[in-house]
Image (cartoon, rainbow, N blue to C red):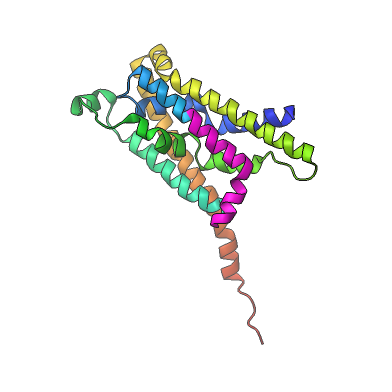
Amino acid sequence: MVNDLLIGYMTLFSIINPFGVAFVFLSMTRYASEAERSAIARRVGIFSFAVLIASLLIGSQIMRFFGISIPALRIAGGLVVALSGWSMLSAPDDDVASEASPTHTADPQARAFFPLTVPLTTGPGTIAAAIALGAIRTGELRHMVEGVVTSCIVAALVALTITVAFAYAGTMSRWIGAEGTRVITRLTAFLLMCVGVQIILTGLADVLPPMIAAGLHPPDAAE
């Protein structure tokens, strides 16, 4: 059980990269105050926990019910992630944006689930990894209970890490300065776009070879 906890946490942590995404979160909530940003971080943490626990426990059943394949999830989610990265990469600097839009009426809390939680934080790659990790075990009741407990603990630890990283994004930004924050934000946005493209390519790699093979080797016509 401890081994499953470590593997699950490290797998999801490495995919989400909460401290790297925190600078993207900071850029997308630049009009919010510190108190508002902390509240948004808590909401993102709660939503992330819900997404992770659902993916770990019943993700495969939900996708099977709606007829959604993992490649389809990757392609659609990767497209959203890539577009989010591109919009951030092509956006003007914060100071220019602030001069152009001194007031910002949109409620930042409304963006806590989309796009801050899905697909920015717990995107298709995270969901696919959580489904693959699926800690529920078939067989003895004890194994199934251990799987549920492990899934809950892993999801809670990852969500807590996300909350802390996002809540202290402003503090980290002040440590490295405005120019450093701008550089890291741009770099992270570019990497986010690359991650989205890579997710799309992974989905296409799962779909295209069987389709090409089926086209090259059609079934023999019935006599």
Q: Is residue 92 left or right of residue 70?
A: left
Residue 68 visible? The answer is: no
Part of the protein shown in magenta: 45-68
Viewer-closest of 109 and 179? 109
Q: Outermost residue toward the bottom?
A: 223
Principal SS element in the magenta part?
Answer: helix
Which residue is found at the position 62% from the left and 40% from the top? 56
Please state the horizontal and vertical placement of residue 209, each as a whole percent of the image: 58, 59
Please state the horizontal and vertical placement of residue 213, each as a whole percent of the image: 60, 65
> Where the N terminus falls, by quadrant?
top right
| In the image, residue 164 above or below residue 86 | above
Q: Is residue 158 left or right of residue 102?
A: right
In the image, is residue 61 part of the stretch drawn in magenta? yes
How many dots with numbers?
0
Q: Is residue 153 left or right of residue 100?
A: right
Q: Quadrant of residue 222?
A: bottom right
Which residue is found at the position 29% from the left and 24% from the top? 31
Q: Quadrant of residue 218?
A: bottom right
In the image, is residue 199 part of the stretch drawn in magenta? no
Residue 81 visible? The answer is: yes
> Where the C terminus falls, by quadrant?
bottom right
Viewer-closest of 132 and 97? 132
Viewer-closest of 55 and 184? 55
Q: Outermost residue toward the right?
A: 140
Q: Quadrant of residue 179?
A: top left
Please state the horizontal and vertical placement of residue 140, each as a whole percent of the image: 80, 42
Please state the horizontal and vertical placement of residue 184, each as a whole percent of the image: 41, 24
